[in-house]
Amino acid sequence: MADAVPSATAGDRLHTPEGATAVLVLADGTVLWGRGFGAARSTVGEVCFNTSMTGYQEIVTDPSYAGQIITFTFPHIGNVGANRLDVETATPHCLGVVLRAGPTERSNYRSEWEFDHWLGSVGLPGISGVDTRRLTRRIRDRGAPSGALCHAPDGVFDLEALRRMAADWPGLEGMDLASHVSCTQSYSWSCGLWDASSGSDRYLPAPEPEFQVVAVDFGAKQAILRNLAHRGCRVTVVPAGSSCEDIMAHRPDGVFLANGPGDPAATGRYAVPEIRRLLEAGIPVFGICLGHQLLALALGARTEKMHMGHRGGNHPVRRLETGTVEITSQNHGFVVSEDTLPATVEVTHRSLFDGTIEGFRMRDRPVFAVQYHPESSPGPHDSGYLFDAFARLMRGGD
Amino acid sequence: MPRRHDISSIMIIGAGPIVIGQACEFDYSGTQACKALREEGYRVILVNSNPATIMTDPDMADATYVEPITPDTVRQVIANERPDALLPTMGGQTALNTALALARDGVLEQFGVELIGADLDAIEKAEDRLLFRSAMERIGLESPRSHLVSCEEEARDALALVGLPAIIRPSFTLGGTGGGIAYNAPEFEEIVRSGLRASPVGTVLIEESVLGWKEFEMEVVRDRADNCIIICSIENVDPMGIHTGDSITVAPALTLTDKEYQRMRDASIAVLREIGVDTGGSNVQFAINPQTGRLVVIEMNPRVSRSSALASKATGFPIAKIAAKLAVGYTLDELDNDITGVTPASFEPTIDYVVTKAPRFTFEKFPGTAATLTTSMKSVGEAMAIGRTFAESLQKVMRSMETGLAGLDDVPLPGVGPDGAVIDRETVIASLSEPVPDRLLRIAQAFRCGIGLEDVHRASSIDRWFLRHVMDIVHAEGRVGSDGLPDRALAMLELKQLGFSDARLARLAGVTEAAVAGRRRALGVRPVFKRVDTCAAEFPAKTPYMYSCYEGDGVSPAECESDPTDRIKVVILGGGPNRIGQGIEFDYCCVHAAYALTEAGYETIMVNCNPETVSTDYDTSDRLYFEPLTTEDVIELVRAEQRRGTVAGVIVQFGGQTPLKLAHALQSAGIPILGTSPDAIDLAEDRERFSTLLRRLGLRQPDNGIVTSTPEAEAEAARIGYPVVIRPSYVLGGRAMEVVHDPASLRRYMEQAVVASGDNPVLIDGFLSNATEIDVDCVSDGSTVHIAGIMEHIEEAGIHSGDSACSLPPQSLTPGVIAEIRRQTDLLAHGLGVRGLMNAQFAVKDGIVYVLEVNPRASRTVPFVAKATGVPIAKVAARVMAGEALADLDLPSTELRHVAVKEAVFPFARFPGVDLILGPEMKSTGEVMGVDESFPAAFAKSQIASGTNLPQGGTVFVSVKDDDKAHLVDISRQLAGMGFDLLATRGTAQALSAAGLEVTLVRKVLEGRPHVVDAMLSGNVDLVINTTQGLQAIADSFSLRRTALTHNIPYYTTVEGARAAVRAISAIRGGRLKAAPLQSYLGGSF
């Protein structure tokens, strides 16, 4: 495939196709032309793909995408515009988006802005007109590449500079991004889930709190906080670098380790010692995604970079306890290595796509975690029971 | 949980004949189910009266009962076969209702048969609207406000509560039969009455209107471990108020935020759990208020459906196959996803393209009925197209319809002058609110006239998102119209990415299609093929299921995934959307071609755009292209295949008229056509060349002529002598064919025929009154001709062969006549140079055989002949076309010890105001087969299977035209002999009295009340025999036939049909009908 694609050389500046206002240049020199939208700027990061057909705004605002340029495999993005409710964090941390079709005009009663305007307003560039299926196949076959995305309305590009940008980008491995996307000061969260009863568009107020939970923010999605609040948690969100003392000072009934971007090993350098101390305290701990990986590291396991990662809303996971299958929302590029898990840990969930670990719990402590996203947003709601399980642990049950 | 070992035999009930609302999607599902269960080692017992299906092929089940699908017959089959379980979810509403009746009557319990897939409770809860509504309340889901009523008075009270417009939905009917939307009180009363009659339980639901709301469907699969997955979401472009089968729909849903989508997902899973569909696939329908997002559940089907067929083809996930495996105990995670081969079936498919489905209508066949769409389904087929964007898939589906469209073609619009200028804006906008079949074309036209998006949206309630894309297409059209064809690759590519066909661009630019194709190829703008892989390329696809699209940035070549093999391949062109005259029979032939050529070692490549079919299953052929059957699309995919390996040829003779029309273009593109040459096909269609051939062969045909104007027609008809059969050339299904008896009718016809046939000439044949019509199907390899079946029509010549019942073997022909027919068939096959299938129609009058018509291609009767004789002639023909000799294929003799009768099934109940009288224009949607040891028993079965409940006693009303009176005496005497009372109008009564028969006189409708229709309405008539002739007499007796239809009174409109019916009644009374498997008749010869 690669031989059919022209490589970036200085001379290619002359060959910009007519109307091209954006380009995605991969580290290996692959050049993908298209039309730009959103912010007119260039950006560099890992190019990944997501196979969800709904929920692009939640995906773009998921802090776990820090350091990444998101390719949407579904061709039409923008259909329902953008609104202030469907965000997972106030400012997105992904680097840009790659689309097949141009962003479409919005049509939905919930929308407030056109997607491309909103994307521009949060400073993100986008490229459309790319054969995203071809790009996805490339990622599938050869792994997620580094890429430089440039949106230039005048159609002038320095391809060689972009290629160098991409080639020089160090990659996510070894990169701690959680500290960049984490809150800097603690805050409390008390807002509940979206009101699914017909005919209203709002978040419900949370019920009267029953527990005090500290959520360590490695890049937390708001949907997680909403799910916790909905289960009766008064949530205090603390920065990624918080110490065990900082956390315990809130006298929590349970600690939640949030999702987030980057290499867990890198973030683990400062987070793991604190998590170990939390574990010693015997307090209920629940981790999601990066939180899951950090917990595994704290327990002595290792993590590794995946070939292309899991990103989509259709991933089947077996819940080993019952044998049932959950359709899950996933977004991770690192995974816990199974053979490094200590004996104190029991695998509870497994991917039916590739058999990788999707969840574990400690045999002797009220500690468990999942690799995927039970808070969904976007994605199916099959796994909401995990938040109930956390509440049960805090109540003293199992 | 592995498969169950406590059951070893499973019965599957099919859907019976193709009718509106139940088309070949249930052949797809039944075939998948049969294959899936046999693969697991179960003994499969199948009941289906439809011979044109793949599922009734004798090697698909262990025992195949081509028998009427009635509780009575199925009970007999159960008694014979003693199955352990019954899977009722594969055969549509027919199978579900039959299973329900057997469960309620205690038959299943008596024989220890377990319902699998859906149990009695679940079926009742899903199908009974009141139970369904309270179930929805229990799980906190809203339904439209509604009240179930069982009489007109209750209906009036209910109306006061829900208000107008109101939806009327009869309980337990198929595709909404008898229901509708009432906008005013009189309309309300009328629909309620018809709904109460249509409902087998006599109840209708009066429902709050959610007209104009957005409509969605979710295809859900659940296993016994309670794993639930959504296979596909479907959004209707047409808002609520138009039956989903009649709506343009897209997959996936395109206008929902994730929060709304997940709410609907949660709701649909909750519905399955609450209704209690423990295993299998179901379809749940929702409406969403576009202003507020309020979500209401409309209904659910606890079985596979038309939508699940669509969802299967749209995603590649084989719902019916998986549902069958789940029904015998597997869970989703134990089953493989065939498409990827590496992932389990327990995941939700995700797609990276847009699928658009459009319905195919045939209102032109039913003059007298309004072409208006309601909640009662009226379409007879559908096409589906896959594109990378909505625009691309929309334009592809438009040209897939084969209604002459190349895209969003121009249409006349009320309020717009001939020059395209808007005369009355309000009229234009108002016309967009009418739910008519071509509304989307009207909308495109309105955009062309400068009507704005908001006005169109307000009038049509179609979501702005879809309208915006239609508008984009129209704007691009405008640029081609003003600037001409692009001369730069990127601009051409951008047009093609919007889905424009070369033909459409040609019309817009005022050049030929060849010129566009030439320019496009010169610019290097060619389609690439992407794969349908269930996973948006996350995993490599093992299955070559492909669609075309245009990719690229104008710089680097686009990526094509067709990846052709180096094998020798045969391309089989399918039949496109089902319609009257071209239906499942042709899909059957294409599937058989694929099977046969695979056996012969070729790589088979199927091309079709009909999502309901077995041919578009990914495992029917080696490779599948889901593409429109147009010259452009087919040539491009053949070119892709030619990049590697060898394309031995294309089969165009099996898919009906659709692929035949492409033969010349393919040939001139240098693509080999297998079998009979396109020129020979032309020769048979070209009247003059054909007459010359017949003269050379020394064969007779009715006197005939070709005319191009009304005066010519009058002169020619006078020369031949009335009555004459008149029709345009090149038609299938007898479109616009008519028997005319006088010059006035001829003149009236000529005015319409010119419209019907464009520039084509009109053919006039002498009509052989009271002749016997014969159909022959044969296969020829160029030297030997194998006569596969000779069928005698029950109805006399003049009724379209697709609409008449027929018997195999013939019942009234002498050995001499049969030998003559064989001789003539042989001569014709040689004379035309046939290599493959040929169908010939003859008329026999006074012992003389006339050739009526010859078609050197697969005919509608091929599957019937194959089922009746046990010789798979479509397979044989395919191998002959690929070069094998008949002598090497070892065909068994076709001496039969049984009789098979084919009967047609009509959609008249769907079209109020349409006459049921038969003629040379085909009106039937499907067929059934009755098979037994004698003709009367086989005919009786065919009648029962087609829904005609022959009475065994009671009153027969007879009223026949003068010519038939002599025959009627004989028939009436037999009826009287069986104890029937005779009721007749004056003329007929006199004839019967004169023959010494006791008869009660009744008034014709015109003669004042009480008349015969009153007698029928009062339930005093059990059988109607009514033949008539002449426009006035036909008009006068219209209400009589219509009443028979709406009150389910068996009726016969030909004297020969009546005669057969009387023999059938006698057979039924004698207890001579025995259900037996096809295999027992065929003696394992398949």
Image (cartoon, coloured by chain):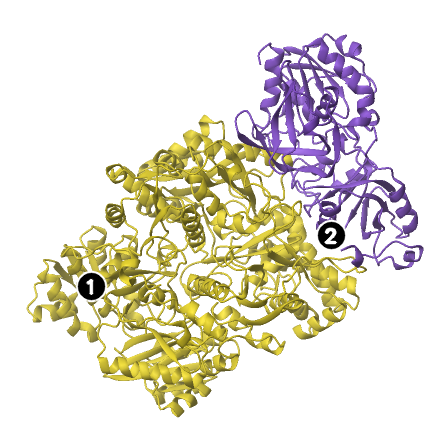
The vertical placement of B283 against B73, above or below, is above
Q: Name the residue under label 2.
A: A131
Q: Is residue B239 visible?
A: yes
Say left or right for A236 vs B94.
right
Q: Mark 1 points at which residue?
A: B936
x and y percent of residue A128 in the render?
Answer: 77, 49
The vertical placement of A171 against B352, above or below, is above
Say left or right for B184 vs B646.
left
> Within 10 Å of the Cα at label 2, are there few (<14), some (14-19), or many (20+) other Cα atoms?
many
**Residue B409 versus residue A176: which sits nearer the camera?**
A176
> Within 10 Å of the Cα at label 1, are there few (<14), some (14-19), or many (20+) other Cα atoms?
many
x and y percent of residue A179 in the render?
Answer: 83, 24
Amino acid type of the residue that numbered disc 1 sits on in the rendered structure: Pro
Quarter holding the C terminus of chain B is: bottom left
**Mark 1 belongs to chain:** B
What residue is rendered at 28% in x and 69% in y?
B808
**Residue B19 versus residue A181: which sits nearer the camera?**
A181
Q: Is mark 2 on a helix, strand or loop?
A: loop
- Identify the mark at residue B121; answer none if there is no mark: none
Chain A's colour is: purple
**Residue A359 versus residue A204: which sits nearer the camera?**
A359
Res A43 → quadrant: top right
Q: Is residue B196 visible?
A: no
Real-space Cα separation, disc 2 to disc 1, in angstroms:
64 Å
Chain B's colour is: yellow
Amino acid type of the residue that numbered disc 2 sits on in the rendered structure: Asp
What residue is rendered at 66% in x and 13% in y?
A284
